[in-house]
Image (spheres, rainbow, N blue to C red):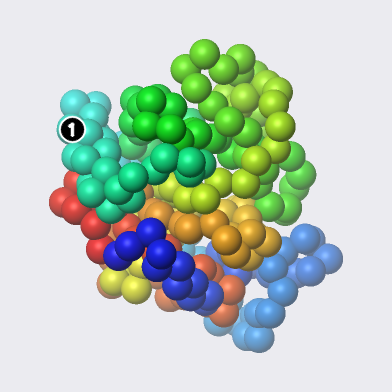
Amino acid sequence: MTMEDDRRTYASPPCFLHELSAEEGGLPGATDPVQARDVARWRKAERARLLADRAALPVATRKTAAEAVARGLDLLLGDLCGKTVSAWWPIQSELDLRFWLATLAARGATAALPLVVEKAAPLRFRAWSPATRMERGVWNIPVPADGDWITPDIALAPVVGFDAERFRLGYGGGYFDRTLAANPSIRPVGIGLASARIATIFPQPHDIAMTAIVTEEGSA
């Protein structure tokens, strides 16, 4: 996989049934409400299982995994000079890559964090560094308090689960899918634990595959 590889594969709407409704601000295009409902129920149960497994891991194990992922990102992404890379402020036992983001400025790159600014709308992004003034955003997650809106070249996304086709099981809100659909220039890279790989997420018409998934065991 190279930086020039910008293949984008679409498959499904977010996994909560109510979000399939355009009236609720969801993604359009669901053609089989019964199937969508069944997938939503399955994803909810599978998400709960995977989150419980991840939360049960010792902090030291997750830290070691994050360090291995950082090395994998360096191999995958190469020279980042002039690029903007977004990640996340860790919640729910997610791998913490803030230490890696903090190295980007010295490489001539810009680190960014996502913000939810409107329900059922694409994410927005602001630059971040360890010195950035933060405030509490949606779900009480710290976000940059001010700064211009920017569009990342590469968006790292935490995965709850993922499959061999690089489809990502997230938290079900659909924000990341909406963001990628609205910004096709963004290269999405999923980040998670190798143990989170599952046979399939049962992708639906508007799910968007990641261009790569990086775990502590490498990238796929």
Out of 91 and 70, give the one closest to the viewer: 70
Give residue 170's position: percent from left, percent from top.
47, 54
Q: Of the residues shown, which amino acid type is indicated by label 1? A: Thr
- Quadrant containing the N terminus is bottom left
In this image, 97 relative to 150: left or right?
left
Is 220 left, or right, of 170 in this rendering? left
Quarter containing the C terminus: bottom left
Residue 179 locus on image (x, y percent): 63, 56
Above or below, comparing residue 201 to residue 45 in the picture: below
Residue 203 visible from this viewpoint: yes
Residue drawn at 47 percent across, 50 percent down: 154
Q: How many marks?
A: 1
Q: Toward which corner of the image does residue 46 lie, by quadrant?
A: bottom left
Other residues around mark 1 within 10 Å, as few (<14) / some (14–19) / many (≥20): few
Q: Residue at x 38, y 25 (%)?
A: 106
Q: Which residue does the image show at 21% across and 40% down from the upper left?
A: 71
Q: Is residue 174 visible?
A: no
Where is residue 56 drawn, in percent x and y? 25, 36
Residue 18 spot, x, y in % from top left: 70, 64
Judged from the image, the secondary structure of the residue bearing numbered disc 1 is helix
Q: Residue furthest bottom?
A: 31
Vertical comparison of 72 with 41: above or below: above
Residue 18 or residue 190, whichever sits in front: 190
Nearest the viewer among 111 and 139 is 111
Q: Which residue is mark 1?
A: 64
Q: Residue at 54% across / 27% down in the picture?
A: 128
**Looking at the picture, does residue 81 appear above or below residue 37?**
above
Q: Is residue 6 above or below residue 120?
A: below
